[in-house]
Amino acid sequence: MMRRMALALPRVFALALVGVFVLAGAAAAHQFQMSEIWVMFAKDGTWRADVLLDVDMLLQIPYEALVIPTMTAAQAKDKRLPTEQELRDFLREQFVANFDGKPAKIDVEFVSLTKKDIGYWTQTTIPPRSFRLVGRAPGGATKFSLKASAHFGVVSLSLRREGADTATQKTVFPGTPSPDWNFTGS
């Protein structure tokens, strides 16, 4: 009897552990626990934000589950996958870039990045295809902030000017804007 209980205990523990991981996965749905974003302001007034998330993985999430943050892929009734244009449109809606408190136009590009593109060491594995937010700073603007929707979890935000040797690091909580950053150096 004791021997049977001793053999059954590891199985019960393993099943409980699997249950914890399944529940955790369902609760998180497709949201990311943390996202890493590298923002660079060019001397010509343009800016880019490289978001280190795998575009090809995002394209494998049913469109319905992509736009409803609490839905898992398994819960989606419509299993249609998003087109690249639908994914671009969705991503554009998930970010707000502000200059001096006013929202700016954002475009989304799918790009293949290297650590050289980012310019700084990252602990994150760079996926084969990430996405980049791009735009132009309005003339005379001095302050920048970025807000990512709650889909992207806690955001590790790194900001730098073109040619700078260092970046300013900020941690931004889900769905909240970053503090203003003086990107002009004045």
Image (cartoon, grey):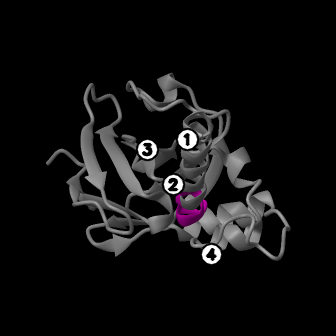
Q: Earlier in the sequence, mark 1 or mark 3?
A: 1
Q: Amino acid at mark 3?
A: Glu
- Which label lies toward us, 2 or 1? 1
Report crowding for label 1: few under 14, some 14 to 19, many 20 or more residues within 10 A (C-alpha).
Answer: few
- Secondary element under disc 1, as helix, strand or loop, is helix
Q: Amino acid at mark 1?
A: Leu
Left or right relative to 88: residue 101: left
CA gap between label 1 and label 3 equals: 41 Å
Q: Residue at x 43, y 58 (%)?
A: 153
Task: Considering the whole magenta stretch, tell me its main secondary structure.
Answer: helix
Which residue has dot 1 on it? 9
- Which label lies toward us, 1 or 3? 1
Which residue has dot 4 on it? 68
Which residue has dot 3 on it? 36
Report crowding for label 3: few under 14, some 14 to 19, many 20 or more residues within 10 A (C-alpha).
Answer: many
Which residue has dot 2 on it? 32
- Residue 67 in sight in this render: yes
- Which label lies toward us, 3 or 2? 2
Where is residue 106? Give x, y as percent: 52, 63
